[in-house]
């Protein structure tokens, strides 16, 4: 999603530099009139706004505070827009470290996927002090269709995203279960998709993800390992809050089982492949499994 967000920033007329481990992404950034660099420090020198789009808190910490990290090159008064899904406690810890250097931190997880990122139509669930919102506004306006300002305290944005991920993970797991169950009933799963997407049982995730199952396409637009991580955060927070999460816990175990079966790097719809294997069924794209 980071490349799409960078392109949206360029289209808005901002001067955009970027860093990525993927050389192809850097080439695409340069082709889009951005400036590619090989380290966060090089990319962020003299930047007013630094957008961090990685997988988790550990990667965010590395980008910001690791070797050749961004924060060392940033100036006081600049702002970090942190968009990885992480626990509220991790977000607060990173914000505190940034504040020690006079740098604002916006807890700003995102939703919408790669297509919305490329269109500048993401949803941002953000929290942080007013100064952080003000400093981040040019980038937020360019990247997002909707920016929710959820409070002054870092951690609120991450909490909202975790609730979203609970629902997203449960809906993906349920969709995979439903389409595979339909296969076990000898139903035409293409027709099942058509009927369900016009019926009350539909969900955004069913409609978005099951088209890939029908096509036998398990490419990692969003990997199984992402939901192992995110539902793991949900589970950890539930335990801390002494709040029962039976449905989310069942979904988490399906993702863990799928990752344990060697599909952690594949698309999150691979939960359907796991269920099909267990049931002795064959879904599209499983011919070579």
Image: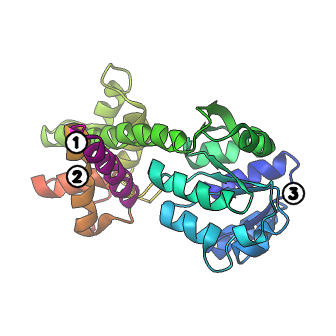
- Quarter where residue 238 is shown: top left
Query: Mark 3 or mark 2, which is nearer the start of the sequence?
Result: 3
Find residue 47 and report its horizontal and vertical position in percent.
Answer: 82, 61
Relative to residue 183, is residue 228 drawn left or right? right
Question: Could you say whether the residue bearing mark 2 is in a helix, strand or loop?
Answer: helix
Find residue 95 and report its horizontal and vertical position in percent.
Answer: 60, 54
Could you tell me how far apart the alpha carbons at marks 2 and 3 are, in whole angstroms? 43 Å
- The residue that mark 1 highlights is 177
User: At 53% from the left edge and 67% from the top edge, which residue is drawn?
Assistant: 59
Q: Is residue 21 visible?
A: yes
The N terminus: image quadrant: bottom right
When the figure is inspected, residue 269 is found, relative to residue 160, above or below; the finding is below
Residue that lies at the very extreme toward the bottom in this rendered image? 67
**Which numbered tag is attached to residue 15?**
3
- The residue that mark 2 highlights is 254
Q: Is residue 241 magenta?
A: yes
**Which numbered tag is attached to residue 194?**
none
| Magenta span | 224-245
Query: Mark 1 or mark 2, which is nearer the start of the sequence?
Result: 1
């Amino acid at each position: 999603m980071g490349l799409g967000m960078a392109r949206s920033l360029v289209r808005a007329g901002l001067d955009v530099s970027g860093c990525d481990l993927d050389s192809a992404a850097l080439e695409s950034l340069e082709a889009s009139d951005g400036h590619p660099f090989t380290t966060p420090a090089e990319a962020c020198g003299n930047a007013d706004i630094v957008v961090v789009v990685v997988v988790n808190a550990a990667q965010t910490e590395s980008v910001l505070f690791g070797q050749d990290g961004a924060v060392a090159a940033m100036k006081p008064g600049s702002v970090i827009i942190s968009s990885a899904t992480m626990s509220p406690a991790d977000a607060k810890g990173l914000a505190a470290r940034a504040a020690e250097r006079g740098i604002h931190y916006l807890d700003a997880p995102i939703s919408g996927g790669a297509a919305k990122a490329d269109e500048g139509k993401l949803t941002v669930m953000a929290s942080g002090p007013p100064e952080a919102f003000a400093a981040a506004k040019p980038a937020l306006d360019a990247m997002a269709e909707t920016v929710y300002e959820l409070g002054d305290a870092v951690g609120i944005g991450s909490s909202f995203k975790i609730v979203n991920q609970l629902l997203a993970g449960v809906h993906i797991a349920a969709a995979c279960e439903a389409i595979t169950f339909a296969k076990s009933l000898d139903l035409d799963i293409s027709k099942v998709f058509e009927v369900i997407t016009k019926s009350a049982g539909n969900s955004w995730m069913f409609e978005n993800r099951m088209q890939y199952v029908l096509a036998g396409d398990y490419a990692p637009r969003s990997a199984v390992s992402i939901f192992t991580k995110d539902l793991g955060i949900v589970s950890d927070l539930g335990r801390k809050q002494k709040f029962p999460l039976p449905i989310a816990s069942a979904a988490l175990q399906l993702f863990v089982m799928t990752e344990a079966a060697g599909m952690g790097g594949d698309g999150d719809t691979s939960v359907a492949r796991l269920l099909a294997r267990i049931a002795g069924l064959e879904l599209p794209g499983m011919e070579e499994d």
